[in-house]
Amino acid sequence: MPGNYLLSASVIALAMAAPMGALAADNPKDATAVEQVIVTATRGADGVDADRIGSSVTVITAQDMAARQVRIVSDVLRDVPGFAVSRSGGVGGFTQVRVRGTESNHVLTLIDGIEADDPFYGEFDFATLLGDDVARIEILRGAQSALYGSDAIAGVIDYITPTAQEAPGGRMRVEVGSENSFGGAARYAGVTGPVDYVVTAGVQRTGGYVEQTLPGGQRRVGSELQAFSAKAGWRVTDNLKLRGVVRYTDTHAETDNSSFGRGLVDSPLTYYDARNLYYFVGGDLKLLDGAWTHSVSFQGVDATRDGYGANLRTSGDDGLRKKASYVTTYRLQTGGLTHLFTGAVDWEKQTYQNTSPPSSGADTTRRSIRDVGLVGQYDLQVGDRAGVGGAVRHDDNDHFRNVTTWKVQGFYRVNGMIRLRAAAGTGIKNPLQTDLFGYNATGPFPFRGNPNLKPEQSRGWEGGVDLAFLDGRVSLGGTYFHARLQDEIFTYFGGPGLPAACPTPPAGTSTTCNRATDSTQKGVELFGNIKLLPELNLSGSYTHLTARENGLEEIRRAPNIGSANLTWRPLDGRATVNLNVRYNGRQLDSNFSGISAPFPASLPDVKPATGANAGKVVLGSFTLVNLSASYDLSEHLEVFGRVENLTDEAYYEVFGYPTQPRAAYVGARVKF
């Protein structure tokens, strides 16, 4: 298998991850835990209280991750309001997350504070992220470019692992299951004087299932995902802390080729390898009794991906990101008012190259883009009753036109039961490497880039209300959101619809253009948490979405998505049972495979789209049921098991890619 832990472990652990807050959410495990800190909502080092944020916030706690036995992080994101997840086939298949009807490259992904998006693809492939047993996820929805720059049009997903002080000791997990699957993880965390260190490793391997679209396939498409991470911290003095992170992932996933008119067909010795190295080093200094904080950091990503057919390398790419930041925050307390003044400077350089073989006709020029971002942020808190805040960012880019983005947010607590909140802002997304310079200029389907593309820009707002009653045992909430995207980048395949500003490509050649018309995304998010009994908890979410591009419904974004989780902790908490139900309504998808109607029985509930959507397909709605349980045999030993897709639902998330049938897993965890 490509990559190994011995190579990864040779990297010296640096220092501990981004500052940690306690666990709170729109949909928290404990509905009363609102006086908590969200680190992603501000560039300042100390974070913001969860109940003093006007933007929509969701946190998936470590307890939630454990109860649902999350192994692939993208699976649990299906439970977040406003989220649509699509995976091309089984575990290891390219996995995209769309937020509030936007594109998958419109959400910024952080891992322990590191910008993890692949610089070449301009988005994060969630197929490569294994779940840590004690991690949590902070999620901000709505435009966050004023804080984080490009990529944060729709929000931020921050995957956070705890320090040794927060989760000390060791733990090891092993499991086996359907499709010749094997999973394992190990973590050890300790504190020695002023030094805090954590080392983790994980692997998830499956023999896979047959993914050929039409009947008669025999090849099982499997994968192996490996991950290693290390961090340590040194508290030099009471006011000075050094920290950092190293993380390495190695993904080997088998794939099948698509045959035009037939869909996926058995393709022996076809696969891809993806290797990602993430690193972060930084220091935090507190002055004036902690009122004035300073943070300096340097981080980077080195992402490579290679595709193989018949064991020969057929494609490849390489993306590098280096980023340096300085952030300072001053807290001023005047009576019942708290003022937070934050300033930040970001320097970033992204380098990318198409490394495909010459036979592909790819442009293999190595290119770089530099950006300097200046951020100013102000937040005012009026006791526990109200608060307002805003941020503005100016980006000076050496390739695109300079741009300024902004955001405002606020909340008002009417009484102990009702909290009102609102937010608005703008976002930006720079064109991708392939958008600008193409992928292959020759071959049967030549694609040329457009170096004159403009960045996509978004403007949106949201308003919501949170309710809490029965001594916090019940919490409910709802949000209405509306956004408009300008200069959306799309691929032009020929025929009518080419904007006047876009040059006409050669006959038979596709290219990229900025749309002359705006795209819109609007909808309603509902969420709630009910503590039915001290040991029984019910949570859920529902999203109704209307997303239009050029007046037509967007693909892979169902208008109706919902989920529910019932968690039971009997025997004084020694046992945990979780029932997870996820509903995905009917949705559109493209038909790049060219399969003609009537579709065969191996494409359940798939129909050809009609009218203005002719040429696309309609994927049927589906409901997935997952059941998991665990039991502590002792203080140090736990056994667990789960069944995914309990009802053996046959469905499609991406047209032409069959999804996983019912699968069962059992395992054990040792804690010490």
Image (cartoon, rainbow, N blue to C red):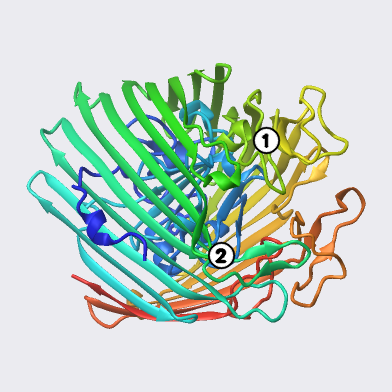
Residue 546 can be seen, yes or no:
yes
Q: Which residue is mark 2?
A: 255
Q: Earlier in the sequence, mark 1 or mark 2?
A: 2
Q: CA distance from mark 1 to mark 2?
A: 26 Å
Quadrant for the N terminus in the image: bottom left
Q: Is residue 179 left or right of residue 265?
A: left
Secondary structure of residue under mark 1: loop
Residue 470 can be seen, yes or no:
no
Q: Identity of the amino acid at label 2?
A: Thr
The residue sitting at the left extreme is: 193
Image height of 54 relative to 524, above or below = above
Q: Identity of the amino acid at label 1?
A: Arg
Secondary structure of residue under mark 2: loop
> Which residue is more in the foreground, 327 or 252?
252
Quadrant of res 406: top right
Q: Is residue 436 left or right of residue 177?
A: right
Q: Which percent across, then down, holds residue 602?
A: 74, 76
Q: Which percent across, then down, holds residue 100?
A: 64, 45
> Which residue is more in the foreground, 20 or 319?
319
Q: Which percent across, then down, holds residue 334?
A: 34, 19
> Which residue is more in the foreground, 473 or 573?
573
The crowding category of the residue bearing disc 1, from other C-alpha atoms within 10 Å (few below 14, some 14 to 19, many at least 20), is many
The crowding category of the residue bearing disc 2, from other C-alpha atoms within 10 Å (few below 14, some 14 to 19, many at least 20), is many
Q: Which percent across, then down, holds residue 80?
A: 56, 54
Judged by depth in the image, the label closer to the viewer, 1 or 2, is: 1
Quadrant for the C terminus in the image: bottom left
The residue sitting at the front extreme is: 359
Q: Which mark is residue 448?
A: 1
Residue at the location (54% across, 20% down)?
A: 399
Quadrant of res 309: bottom right
Image height of 397 relative to 11, above or below = above
